[in-house]
Structure formats: C-alpha cells, structure tokens
Amino acid sequence: MKIVKIDQVALLSGLIQYNFFPAQKKEEGEMPPIINSATLTPAIADQLRNLHSRKGGYDQVEYRSTRFNNVSRSLSIPHPVPYSKLCYAIQDNWKEFEYITQSTNSFITPEPHSDGRILVMDYENAQQKIERHVDLTCSKKFFVETDISNFFPSIYSHSIPWALVGFDEAKKQRDHKLWFNQIDKCVRAMKRDETNGVPIGPATSNIISEAILVRIDTILKAEGFVFVRFIDDYTAYFDTYEEAEKFIRRLGEELSKYKLLLNAKKTVIEQLPCPSSPEWVVDLTTRVPKDKDLPSNLIRFLDYAVEKQAISPDGSVIKYAAKTIVREINDKTVGIVLKYLLGLCIKYPILIPVLNTLFEKVDTTNGFVYTSQLIKILDEHTINKRSDAMAWILYYLNHFSQKIPPYTANAIIASYDCVAILMLYLSKQYDNEVITFCNSLDKTDIFLLDQYWLLLYQLFLDIKITNPYADENAYVDLLEKRADTIQDAMQREISAFETLKANGVSFVHAP
C-alpha cells in the first residue's frame, strides 16, 4: 500500500468537480459521461456553502445501480448545497484526516488522478495482486474473509467525531461549532438530518468511512494481525485456526464501538493454500483468443463466458469477458460483438455501460441499425426501474438521434426515476411531458423537490420551468427557531438554483 500526500486544492476540486456524482470505478461506468459536475468549481461551491443551512436538512437523488447478480444498489446524488458545505469542511480540516492516507492495510487511498478525480475504487492489477497474495500467504495456514453488514447505510454520524478525535474527547465536547461536530452536522444535512447512513456514491462518504475504519485497522495491526481491506471487505492470514477466530472476534469488538456489525453470512475461515484469483478468472484468462481478428473466436469466447456465468453466480463473469474483448476490438469485429452483447443485455444489464466503447467504433454511415434492440432492452429495465440501464440506453439513443416511442417515454416518466427522466428530456422529443411531470410535483414537499433537484435544475436552467423552490407553503414547517420569516427561508432556497445558473453551471454537458 502506498502513502500519499494530497494538495488541498486538488482535494477540493476532486471532491466537487469529479467525485460528486457516482464515478468511482476506473472506467467511470456508473453514469453516462454526459452527466457530470465539471463546471461546479470550488469557487462556485464556496458561494453555495455560504448559503444558510436549511432546518431539517436536505434530501438526495436516488440512482439505482445494477450489480452482477442483477440486485440493485442505491447510489445517491446529494443536493449541491449540503455537499459543498461538507467538501469545504473536509478541506478546511484536512490535516485531521490525513491519517487515512497513511494506512498500509486499505486499498482505498484518496489521491489525485490524471482525470481530476480524488478517489478511484479499483483493485490492483493482476501482477500486483499475485505478488501481494504470495507475500501474505507465505507460510500461513488459514485465511479469513469477512465484511461489514450494510456498511454505508449503517454508519452512525455521531461516530465520525469518535474516530476523528477519540471517544472521550468527542463525547465531552458537544459544542456544535467545533470542527469535528461540524463534520457530523454536514453529513447529516445531506440526508434529512438523519444520524444513520452516508450516501453511497460521492467520494466524501469514502473519506468518512476510511476515517472510521483506519482507526480500527491501526488497532488490529498493532495487535499483530496480517490483513488487507477493500472498502469494508477484509481478508486476513494466520498460522492457526485459533488466531483466525480471534481476528473475527476482535474485529467485531472494534466495529461494535462504532455501532457497526460484521456480516455473519459472509464471514468464513478457510485453509491455505488457495488460488490468488477465483477459478473462473483463471479459466477465462487461459481462454482469451489469441487471434482477435476472427469474429468466430470472439463469439466462442463469449459463449464460454455465458456458460461459466451460469455456474459461477457469485462472479461478474460475463462482464469480465466482455471487457476483455472490447479492449482490443477492431473495425472488422465490432459489429458482430455489439449485436451479441446487445442480446445479453436484457438478462445482464451490467453489460450496458460496456457497450459505450463499441458504439464509439461502430460504423453508422448506412444508418443506425440497433434502435429496436435498444428500445426492447430499455422497456425491460424500465419495468424493473433500473436507473443505470435506463440512463445508459437513453444516452445511446440520444447520441445517435433515435426516436423514442411514446409508450416507452410514458413508462420512463411513470418510473419516477430522476436521472432516467432527465435523459428522456435530453432527447428533445418529450419536453411537454417532462415539464408536466415536473410541474405536477408537490411544491409544498421540499424534500420531494430535493429528490428531483438534478432534473428540476436542468429545466430551470433551460427556462422551461420557474424555480420550483418558490412556493411559500413549503417553508411553514422548515423555519428556524430564530426570527426567520417564510420569505427569508424562500430566498435562501431560491438562491441555490440562482447561484448555480448565474455562474453558468450545468450538470449536463460533454465530459
């Protein structure tokens, strides 16, 4: 594990401009690249953070990301006002967080990347993984695999100060103006002022989670345990079975101090030796066709991956195979591979972002011939309300200026999915329907508006709707206990969208 130093300017820019929306995978496959926060500079975020905080906090956009087993994971896009406040609170006190960059156990280390991101969630390359496996398993007899149950949704906001300054100091110093209590407050503000859970997606949540888990890592390392951690997944190595049991016990004890629990269903003790990679990875690696110019070779390889996926449900087999092929695709084979993978996308929506590389290379001189397949895939995943599948398919259809059928558009609106409806709006085919949807939202439910802030802001920016936060009735129950008036509260809310617009911020543009 490497130890890094981070320039605070790069830190702030990374958090705000490049790690605000879900974009932590190496390939940035969580959301279509047209949706990003590159124009939300730290200077503009500084204006947002100086807006007075809303009593009761804010809500956030939900974005459901499909995993390899087709189970959705709920990611979040926080409202930009509380997010800006949290980013600046972290930056202002970065020296107090720097210990997370010095961990030798965690794979997740904030550091500047060439694309501006401050956090990329990626495992080691194959060579590094093999070398680490050989080093850590040498002369060991057992290993443990375990993780934390429902990790990000279980993080207790008041436990963040416990990690930052210690249990005794945090519990003694309750003044909300103290920096560590401000971090707690900013985290809560992103989620209706609730104390349980941090949003999955923004890099701030990984910094918060590392602040807690690195404290635990330090204790376990000092006790002599040999282990590594990827987010909340632990792998540890031992000479005896009893030591493995002790590690599980001690990890559980330390986690409980922060009100976190081990996942009993995913906690196992196994004997060594064991392979450095899952069996299906080793198998597929040996079957990658040497001659990739022959379409038949590529299709046979993908056929084998489909068979392998059926007997390896706990692995992302078909996505691994597809990415392996797509990396070196050429003009002769791109068409057949694209059609083959499109055929799999109804059952395996995790493949849909992988198609982006193929669509960039496909020849559309004689027209775009994939529309009907894309619409069929879109209809299937709209029924299941898969945000990522809907967003990516609409991105492809929009990119190639394809017509979206009315029944499909109506189903997308009926899904109540913020990002999918935004992508439908960007098709420029259903402005009236999307405007009607936005105007139908209950303007007195300010948290409901927050759940659609990304969509509402884009229509406000395009002068298609008025500022949705301008309804006086929305602020009756949200007033501060001071002498604030409804008009004061309204002005603060209206100012957020107005500030973004005045500074030319758009969350929809070429990356």
Image (cartoon, rainbow, N blue to C red):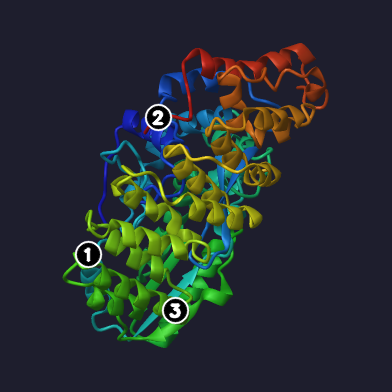
> Is 483 rendered above or below residue 299?
above
Q: Identify residue for label 1.
A: 128
Mark pair 1, 3: CA separation:
24 Å
* Element at label 2: loop
- Residue 452 or 465: which is nearer the viewer? 465
**Quarter residue 191 falls in:** top right
Q: Which mark is residue 12?
A: none
Residue that appears at 33% across and 54% down: 103
- Quarter occupied by the N terminus: bottom left
Q: Identify residue for label 2.
A: 38
> Is 272 rendered above or below residue 428?
below
* Element at label 3: loop
Hey, what amino acid is under mark 3?
A: Ser
- Residue 500 or 230: which is nearer the viewer? 500
Hey, what amino acid is under mark 1?
A: Gln
Q: Identify residue for label 3.
A: 312
* Element at label 1: helix
Residue that appears at 75% across and 22% down: 480
